[in-house]
Every structure is written in C-alpha cells, then in structure tokens.
Amino acid sequence: MKNNSFSLIELSIYYIVVFFILREWLVPVMDLTKTGYMELILLFIALSLVISLFRLNFIVSSFVKIAYIVWFIVFVYGGVFVLSAEGIDFLFNDLQTNLSALMRADWMNITDSFRTFLFFILIWMLIYLIHHWIVVRMNVFYFLLLTVFFVGTLDTFTEYEGSFAIVRIMVLGLVMTVFLLIKRLFNQANIKLDIVKYLKLAVPVVVLVVAVSSIAYFLPKSPPQWPDPVPFIKSAAGQGGGEVNKGGVKKVGYGENDSELGGSFIADDTVVFLAEASTKQYWRVETKDVYTSKGWEDSGYSQGELKSFGPGETIQYSLPRGPEEDTKSASIQVMYPYDFIIQPYGLKSVDASYSENSNFEFVMAMDTEKIMPYTFQAPTTLQEYSVNYSKPVYLYSSLKNPTEEIDPKIAERYLQLPKTLPERVRDLAADIVGGRETPYDKARAIEMYFKQNGFRYDTDNVATPSEGQDYVDQFLFETKVGYCDNFSTSMVVLLRSAGIPARWVKGFAGGDVIDNDGSTSTYQITNNDAHSWVEAYIPSVGWINFEPTIGFNSSRSIDYDLQTDAYQEDVLVIEEETEPDEVVEEQPETQQTAAQGNSFSKNISHFFEQNKFILVILLLAIVVSLFVLYGVRRKWMPKVYGALYRRRGFDESTFESAFLQLLKLLELKGFKRKNGQTLQTFAKEMDAYFETSHMSKLTKCYEQTIYSDNASKVDITQMKESWEYLINRITS
Amino acid sequence: MHKQVEAIIENIEKVMIGKREVAELSVVALLSGGHVLLEDVPGVGKTMMVKALAKSVSAEFKRIQFTPDLLPSDVIGVSIYNPKILQFEFRPGPIVGNIILADEINRTSPKTQSALLESMEEASVTIDGETLQIARPFFVMATQNPIEYEGTYPLPEAQLDRFLLKIKMGYPTAQEEVEVLRRAANDEPIVHLTPVISIDELLELQREVRNVYLEDSVKSYIVQLARATRTVSEVYLGVSPRASIALMKAAQAYAKMQDRDYVKPDDVQYLAPFVFGHRIILKPEARYEGVTTEEIVNRIINKSVIPIKRYAEQ
C-alpha cells in the first residue's frame, strides 16, 4: 500500500481536475443567485485543495481557511480590510446579529454574510469528502453522479444552460475515473506502479473517452423529446392555469391570459367543478372584446367598473333571459380553487351560504361579465354555490325579422378588428354571408362554414402564428387545424367582418355525467372541458351564443314559430349537429351506466398519459433507491434480520435454526462461507475477525447436534450468551 | 486427542522429528484396520517410522526386505517335509504377524508383490490348499521409493487400492534436520522405545472406531467427493466405491483419535487426499503437465458443498 499511495504530482493532477469539476458546480450557483466574486470563491477552493494536497495540520489548515473566509466576508460585505478597526467592528457586529438571530431561530434575519460563511463551510466539507473519495476510496463515481445530476437539474429547471458543462464534466470525470481505476487495479494486484504499464492501460481509455466525446459532439442531435417540464410541473402543482408559452405545449385548463393564442396543449383530467343540473349546458365565465391578431384582450370599455350584488339578488347584465316560470337551479361544487362563478345561460342570481359578518358579496366585472365572490372587498373562493337561471328561448320569428337598429355603443365596441387583419379574411366573410339577409342567417352561415370546409379538430400539432402573422388568418387559410380557440376566434372575426357585433366567450363545456338522480344529473367538469365559443348580437333578440368548433353542439334553444323556406334547412342542420360527434374525447356521449366503467378505465389511461413525466421520474426514483438500498445492503440488512431473529428468541428448540440464521446474518454482512469451507474453519475465521471465541463454541455445539447421534444436551444459557454476543457484534 | 493414541504418537515422536502428521496418519490406518504405503526418496526415515510404530505396540513385528530375487514363498511361507512326523508341515512366512514392515516393496517382482498384496487384502495365506488366518491386528506398512528410480517394479494402480492411505514423508525442515543430526550423534533412541499399548487394548480401540457414528449427511458428503473425482477432466479413472468405504473408515478412526464419537466433514476433508490420492488415475497429458492427484482432490474439496443440516432436513 505504501509504495502505491499517491505521489504529490499525481494527486495534484487529480486535484486540478477536481477544481475544474467544482467550478462547474459554482458557475450555475453564482449565475442563478446573482452572486459575484466568483474568482475569490474559486481561490478558496484552490486554497483548500492545496492545503488538502499537502496534508497540512488540521489546526493550521483550519486557521488559514477561517482567516480567508473572514477576510472575504469583511472585504466583500464591509468593504474594509479585516485587520482595520472598521473591519473588526464590522465582523463583531455581524457575528452578534447572526448569533442572536440563530438563537431566536429567526432564519429570515440571518445576513448574507453569514450565508456566505455557511457556503464556504460547505465547500470545505465537500473538499474533505473529495479527498477521501480520491485517496481512500479511489473512486469518484458518486461525486460525478452528483455533479451530473446537479447540473442536469439546474439545466432543466432554471434558465442556466448546462449542455456544455455536462460534456466537460463527463470528459473530465471519465478520464479521472479511468486513472483512479487503474490505480485501484494496481493496488489490488499488488503491482508496483510503473509509468509504462500505467500508460499502456490509461492511454487507450483516454483516447477512447476523447474519441467518443468528440464524435458525440459532432453528431447531429435531435431536439429534446420531452416538453420543458417546468411549466408542466407548475401547472400540475396547481400554479399554471394554461400559461401561454410561445411555441410550446400548453396544458388545457382555464387560463387568464389569452393574448397569445395558438400552440398545442395536453389533456388534463383535473376535476374543476361538479354541477348538479337538469340539463347539460355551457358554463360561461367571461367575455373578451378586443382581438389583437394574436389573441384576446379586454378593452376596459367600462373602465374596470365593478358591480356588486348580494347572494340571491337578480343580476343585471347583457344577456337575455327566459321566462320566469322556467327558472331552474343548479348547484355547483367547486373542486379546483378558481375564483370565478360559472354562469349558465340565462343566469338570474347566485346563492351561496356565507357567514353574516363576512361582508360577503358577488362582484361582476362589467368589462368581461366575470363574477367573483368577495369578502371584505377582496376576492375569495367558494366551495359551493347554486345558480338560478332561466334559459332564454329565441323566437325564430324574431331572429328572422330583426326590426331594431344596432345600438352604436355595441357596434363600436364589438365590431373592432385589428388594422393588420388581412383583406382576404374580410373577403372570405363576405363570401360566406353572401346571399343571406338577416344577421342570424349570416351568423349561422359562418357557424356552419367550418363544418363544411375541411377544418379539423386537433389539440396536437396546432400552429402558433409567427411574428406578423394573424392568428385567424393562419387558421382559416393555412392550417385549418385547431381547437376551440381557433374556431371561436375565427368566427368572431368573420362575424365582425360581416358587420355583426360579436364577442369571444370563455368558460366550460358541459362535462360528463357521473351521476343521475331522476330529474337532475351530476356533471363532472374537468380542465379538459375548458372551452371558448362565440356570442353574436342579433338585433331585437340580443346576445345569442354560437358554436363554431367542430365536435361541439350548440346549446341554444330556438322556438321555431315560423315556417320559412330556410326553416327545413335550419332544423335539419341542427338535427345533424346533435348527432354523436366524431371527436368523442372532447364531448363524450352522456351514456349513463356504460360510460362510467368506460370512463374509469379511460381516466386511468388518461392519468398515465398526463402524468407520464412524473411517473417516469417516480419510477426512476424507485429504481435508483432500490439500487442504493441494494448497494448498501450490508449496512441495513443485518440490522433488520438481527432485529427479526432477536425477536424470535433463542432456546433449545430453535437452536439449530438460530445458528443457521446467524450464518445468514454473517453472509449478509459479507462473511460468506466459501465452498468447501467447513463450519469449524469458518468459525475460526469469524472468531479471528471478531476477536472472540464465541463462534467456535457455538459451532462446536451445532456440529455435535447435527453430526452425532447422541447430541448431548446443549448448554442453552451459554450458547444463548454467545449467540446474542455475535448478533450484537454483527448488527452493531 | 485420545489418551492411548496420544501415547503412541508421543512415543513415535521420540524417534521421528517433525513427522507428527505421518505418525497420526499411520495410527489412523492402524486403528481402522487398513494398511499404509509410505512413499518417498530413501533416507527420510520411512523404515524408522514403521519400526517406531511397531515398537510402540506390544505386538509381533516382522520385517520383509524386498529384493528382486525374493519369491512369494519367502513372503507367505512354505510347506516343508518333516521327516520326524513324515508329513509336510506348513512353515508360515514373515507375513504372518501383527505389524509387518514391507520395505521397498517396489524392488521385488510383480509375482511376489501380488502374493503380499493378496494376503494383505484377505488377512490370510493359502499354501497347498491350506488356509491360515492371520491373527488380528494385522497391519502392513509398506515403503517404496518413487518410481523414477531405477531397478524398481512400480505397483500397478489396481494394487495400490489395497492400501488405505498413501503417505509421503517429505524432507525435514532445516531446524528439524539439525535436531536429527544431534540425535544421531548419540545412540539410536529407537533402542529404548517401549510399548505403550497392548494388543488387547489395540483391538478394543479398533472395535470402538467401528462404532464411531457417521451421520448420513457426512456419508453423502464422502460420496459427493468420490463422485466428483469421476467427472474431473484431467482424470482418467476416478475412485471406486471401495475408496469411499476406505475414506469412511479412515474418518471414523481419525474422529476417534480426536476423542470424538462422530465424524465431521472436517475429518473427511483432512483425510481425502491421503485416501483418494493414490486411487485416482490421471490422464497422461495431465501427468505431463505436472498435475498431481492431491491437487485434484484438494480442488474438489474446495468446490464441495458442506452439509450443514441433518441428512433428513436437507
């Protein structure tokens, strides 16, 4: 061992490599925490390595390191030299502040300088550990693994770009591993180090490492196969809400920001509401009026006016209502803490149980018609509420014969279009409505346009408009593939182009029936049901909802009180629409019993589909922990078995099995009886190791029990003593 | 260690220096009723060893010095016409005795060798249709020089089977050799050896050895080793079941010597090279490569599975 320990030069080479690897640790940390003075910290690492290299006396090395740390802190935070009066003053003040903060467990008030101190201590310990790994274990695998994992994690979850750092670490680490492995091999084989032999082994491997790395570097690489997990994890943790990520994949759900539409999204089965209602219907949340050519914004037309009303109070807003006698009620159970109230069409009032003194009220933002529950003038969330509504029934005759003139205010607000809207969109709108006379007919034509012209519903592979490209234009003329946002936005734009005031509505589609109790059903509304559609203003009727998205059904009621030529066509079309859709996943049929079993297995598969990333991580974690457990089994398995055996106890009847268990325990500990090794020789070996004679005693007794015909009585107390002694020694 | 056995061995050690193991193994053979073949170069004390053992037992000791011209009748005896009683009279040869030293057995012709070996196996001599049982204890210790030496008739492998153990003496260490010289300078200590065990005591001991218990698991261990010799690639012919019996008997004797009334796998392991060594026939190519049968037996032992439970529980 002596002649094969490290020479100073050899060790210093290792340390230089370690220095560079540690630098890879430091760079992202510094970068992300916006810490400066990296050179000085690197200097500390170098200093520690040099001290470790020369095996300086612990006291001396501690003194040097502490002195450096103190100097650094005073220099960086105090801006003065440590041995000046101000420096000492600063140091003591700082020490006092932090000590008192520590005593009070007041972690928030610990100063940065103290954190820096802890950081230095961490580096110090790390270097001690590395020294141990290199000199004693001659194996830096764990260090490398840790480093790669660390950089990989930072690269994945932060803006730090670690692609090259990983390559550098791998190359340096592999080379270092190679040299240490050779060293270890030499030691094991007891071969004296010899530079020629050493190089004979090392050079090919180093060449290999370099060759492989350079080939890998120059090979073309495919882009990441997984979506960036960060927004995914955030939204899975409930912080997302369909955040828009330019060009990236979104997660479906109700989001606030619609200013940049487009891109694919992935399904999410998180349940947001349970609604108990008599009919399936759309749940409206808010509307938006300004189309920006990329998405939707709120114009602030009413200057952010809020209108408050109490529970049960009738709401005044823009939508028409059905007759009083048709009033129905639906109770909503909130599963996901959105702060808005979902509104059925024809909403009259909202009821909620609330405590008297909580100043509870509902507030409607007049710009968007979004209703939120408030207590003490602050938004809150409700667990349960019920909505009273009377679904409007539009008279076909009124729709067909508009008499009223459009209110200029409405026209001004809801005919807005961006100046950059390409002319071909307007042309298309004119084309579609050509020959139709009433606004309703025009709107119907536009609504039907998508269903008849090869548009396709898809949530994957949906394009995001490039810069300068119009979202609607891209959908209408280029891609023709998209989901509700594409269809609804396009319809609004086409309506406005055709001179019909229209707005964009967000909310939830009807959901799945999960329970049925005669007159009412319970609908489960998940994030997948988040939806957008269109409301158009038809003179003398008011706002009426349209559903351009393929695969979704319109839920408006029209009383066909008038027979016209177009009537048949209209009715036929509506019937056609109400047939089961091809896109079942978005709007599942409301079969009751059969659907439940179905939806269960579907839910499971959806669950796996959605949480793929988390499950993979989980699986990896399990595999890794199993590996680790297996790796350190000699540490814990004897303890577990020891405890087990101790509980089983030791007496005459169990002597034989107890002895065999002892052998097993020894084997777990790493003392396996070799083939052809008799119990007696094994016992001697064990006794030599544990420096006792208990094993021989026990073995002699055991041999007598199993090999002789007249086993004399076992001296159980003495044997028990020996057995317990050995078990304790093995498991301690 | 058994008291009487210890006494015999101590007696031998008075004469032989550093040959305790050989002495022990000889006693193993004596107790189990087998015979021993001592093999080594001349001058390492083979004959002295046998003499010392014989003198330690108050038994009839005979010595046959084998030469190329020795005839079978010189060994087993001859019928001679006795003019007094006008009849042929059987004169038993030196083989009829208790402890027989067959010195340099490989120097005589195969005819004489087989006469000796037959009487060893059957413990009787037959001349002119008359059979004479040789009284017990009957213990033959043969010595031979390794076959590389000239003027010898090597024993056929089949004949070697008659010996329970084949023991090599080996040279003494430097220290021991100095001691040998010191003793040789004075008068021969062998002259002063006195018997430490009577024939009756020895017979009683032999009976006890036969009663030493052998658990079935240990028996199966012996069989395991014996069978293993038959499948080694370098071996032309493995050991016979007779070898397994021999190993069992030797192990019983060895256990008795340790004052134990049951056999352990340790006993079997210790004796296996001495019992199996001369019964394995190597392939010629293996022999040229310098592989020895002892190596093979040790290799088998190192791969064997020791029974650590009773046979019934396995």
Image (cartoon, coloured by chain):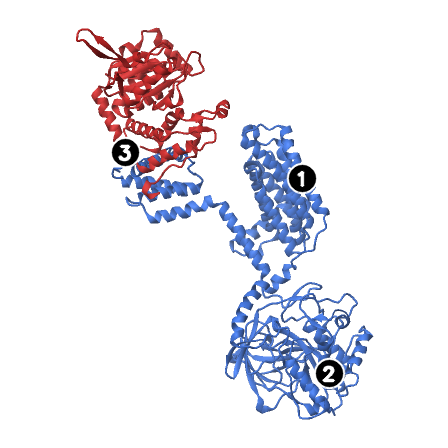
Chain colours: A blue, B red
Q: Residue furthest left?
A: B85
Q: Which residue is mark 3?
A: B213
Residue in the foreground of this view, choosing between A48 and A427: A427
Q: Are marks 3 and 2 in contact (CB under 8 Å)?
A: no
Q: Is label 1 on the same chain as label 3?
A: no
According to the picture, the residue beneath numbered tag 2 turns out to be A443
- Visible residue check, residue A644: yes
Tell me how far mark 1 sits from mark 2, CA to CA.
70 Å
Q: Secondary structure at mark 1?
A: helix
Q: Quadrant of the C terminus of chain B?
A: top left
Q: Is residue A461 above or below residue A391?
A: above
Q: As shown in the figure, which amino acid type bears the numbered disc 1?
A: Leu
Q: Amino acid at mark 3?
A: Tyr
At label 2, the amino acid type is Ala
| Subunit bearing disc 2 | A
Question: Is B138 rendered above or below residue A204?
Answer: above
Q: Does dot 3 land on a helix, a strand or a loop? A: loop
